[in-house]
Image (spheres, rainbow, N blue to C red):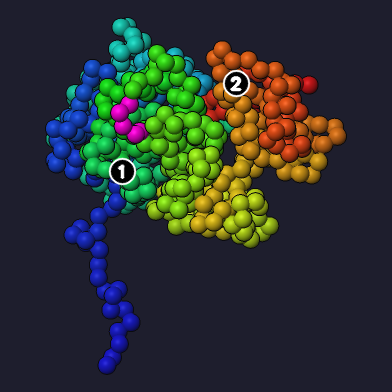
């Protein structure tokens, strides 16, 4: 018999058997199959999936009529409102690239992002308009179409900046607009900027394929059901809200939007709308844990929580689970579309003591299903043993890693050295492929030649009954080189002294790991709840 080596290579891709992956495909399906189900709830405003599909088509049509097309950047500065959700589809349906901008940035940084990303449209939430308006003045461009979101939930007289408002703008579009999927799933769908803690923020480019697979991975690894209800606590400007808006469309779920985040707002949303899912940073968990009796509501069901942004202290995890919240810990970066590592629960751990379970859940976990792997390496890319002890850099590979940094090929090459994405995070590997972040490379404290994990010290501090939040940074020291300096935010009504905190740490930490200095203050945070350690370093006492 004559064997044909290429017998499986003769087939061609056709529209019948190959369609570019894109989360845009989720929306028409949700509208067709579940058009009467609620898609978005925001105060007294409610939309169905049929409504959302119609409005997104109108948005795409209106953008197209203004000459916006493939690879044009549409920027938006907005809270978690229906307009922000609609932009997830409306902008890329026009072929454009969505650039959601952190609402807490100063005018100068917003101006930089608008210029660097070459924004052609800027949509501004009127309540957040002052800094955005100032940014427009700074760049001095008159070629940007500015659209106002006139959200009257918190103001009867919102400030006008643009030449038109959002509702008028999308009303000019065709609700039956014939849009199409991207020609190539590698096409850009979103542009997200890093926090820029050192120098200017970098522009991270996402592709359609990655955003589609992020949703599939979330559904699989979080075990999401059909038609879930989800409170959008994660800012939609942060990694496009971890892609959960697209995920909810895939499942025809319901998104409850929250303009502000507080324990009362979260409890009310969970109770009033029978919501069983939300995501948020560990600071949100602390907020819920420390809620007053007036803020807290009775919840007849378990609430599933996805948390990321910083390693949550085991004490916080234990406390919130006792309130009826089941926490799934995930890890990711802007460069990985959000979460790409998840601490999936293993049945072998069911019979462990509660504090042991909490310690395991504080680990970041194993690579999610849409990823191809994670490693912890040191000393020339040698894999560290899975002993839970030896630290190295966490590196990742998979389908939800960015295309690269916009206009920054050198940084892109450095990030992708040797075919892996370099996270810059120090971690240890446990068995079964479960990683645990110990610190950022830049945050590790080296005292007398010994490495000290600020995360470990923070975990010990969070066990103190008076501590609401804690962060630890390196303080220069003539003798040891560096020593731990703790910044502590106390719970309302609680009190403690520096000596009491240091004495408490003697029970939980080795001598060289204990904080040598304690500062009580309100900790500076990003809009996503991350503590800004670079600001704390400016506050280190002499």
- Which segment did they paint magenta? 299-303
Q: Residue at x 66, y 30 (%)?
A: 472
Q: Can you tell which mark lies on residue 176?
A: none
Task: State the image quarter where residue 166 is shown.
Answer: top left
Q: Answer above or below: position of 493 versus 66.
A: above
Q: Residue at x 57, y 50 (%)?
A: 394
| Main secondary structure of the magenta stretch | loop
Q: Which residue is mark 2?
A: 466
Task: Estimate how packed mark 1 is, as few (under 14), some (14 to 19) or many (20 or more) residues with alpha carbons within 10 Å.
Answer: some
Q: Can you tell which mark lies on residue 224?
A: 1
Does the image show residue 363?
yes
x then y, percent, for residue 171: 19, 23
Q: Answer above or below: position of 366 versus 111.
A: below
Q: Residue at x 31, y 79 (%)?
A: 6
Q: Residue at x 60, y 21 (%)?
A: 466
Q: Answer above or below: position of 243 versus 263.
A: below
x then y, percent, for residue 290: 48, 21
């Amino acid at each position: 018999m004559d064997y044909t080596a290429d017998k499986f290579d003769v087939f061609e891709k056709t529209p019948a058997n190959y369609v570019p992956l894109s989360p845009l495909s989720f929306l028409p399906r949700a509208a067709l199959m579940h058009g009467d189900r609620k898609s978005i709830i925001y105060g007294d405003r409610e939309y169905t999936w049929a409504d959302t599909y119609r409005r997104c088509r109108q948005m795409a049509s209106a953008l197209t009529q203004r000459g916006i097309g493939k690879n044009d950047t549409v920027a938006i500065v907005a809270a978690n409102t229906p307009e922000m959700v609609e932009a997830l589809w409306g902008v890329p349906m026009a072929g454009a690239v969505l650039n959601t901008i952190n609402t807490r940035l100063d005018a100068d940084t917003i101006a930089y992002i608008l210029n660097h990303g070459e924004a052609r449209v800027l949509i501004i939430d009127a309540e957040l308009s002052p800094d955005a308006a100032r940014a427009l003045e700074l760049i001095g461009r008159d070629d940007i179409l500015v659209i106002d979101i006139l959200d009257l939930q918190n103001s009867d007289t919102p400030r006008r900046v643009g030449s038109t408002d959002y509702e008028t703008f999308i009303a000019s579009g065709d609700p039956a607009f014939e849009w199409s999927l991207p020609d190539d799933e590698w096409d850009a769908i979103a542009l997200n900027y890093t926090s820029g803690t050192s120098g200017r923020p970098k522009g991270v480019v996402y592709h359609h394929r990655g955003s589609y697979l992020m949703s599939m991975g979330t559904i699989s690894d979080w075990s999401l059901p059909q038609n879930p209800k989800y409170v959008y606590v994660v800012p939609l400007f942060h990694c496009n809200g971890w892609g959960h808006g697209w995920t909810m469309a895939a499942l025809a779920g319901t998104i409850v939007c929250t303009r502000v985040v507080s324990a009362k707002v979260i409890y009310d949303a969970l109770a009033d709308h029978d919501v069983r899912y939300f995501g948020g940073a560990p600071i949100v968990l602390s907020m819920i844990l420390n809620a007053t009796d007036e803020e807290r509501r009775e919840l007849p069901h378990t609430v599933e929580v996805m948390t990321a942004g910083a390693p949550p202290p085991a004490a916080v995890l234990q406390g919130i689970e006792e309130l009826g919240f089941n926490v799934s810990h995930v890890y990711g970066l802007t460069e990985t579309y959000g979460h790409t590592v998840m601490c999936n629960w293993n049945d072998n751990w069911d019979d462990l003591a509660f504090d042991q379970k909490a310690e395991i859940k504080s680990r970041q976990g194993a690579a999610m299903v849409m990823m191809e792997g994670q490693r912890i390496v040191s000393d020339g890319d040698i894999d560290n043993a899975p002993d839970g002890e030896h630290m190295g850099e966490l590196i990742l590979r998979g389908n939800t890693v960015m295309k690269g940094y916009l206009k920054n090929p050198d940084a892109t090459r450095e990030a992708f050295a040797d075919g892996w994405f370099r996270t810059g995070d120090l971690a240890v590997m446990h068995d079964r492929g479960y990683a645990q972040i110990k610190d950022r490379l830049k945050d590790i404290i080296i005292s007398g030649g010994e490495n000290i994990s600020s995360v470990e010290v923070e975990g010990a501090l969070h066990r103190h009954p008076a501590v609401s939040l804690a962060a630890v940074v390196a303080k220069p020291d003539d003798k040891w080189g560096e020593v731990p300096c703790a910044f502590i935010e106390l719970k309302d009504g609680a009190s403690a002294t520096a000596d009491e905190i240091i004495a408490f740490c003697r029970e939980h930490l080795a001598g060289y790991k204990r904080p040598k200095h304690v500062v009580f203050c309100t900790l500076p945070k990003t809009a996503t709840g991350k503590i800004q350690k670079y600001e704390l370093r400016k506050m280190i006492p002499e």
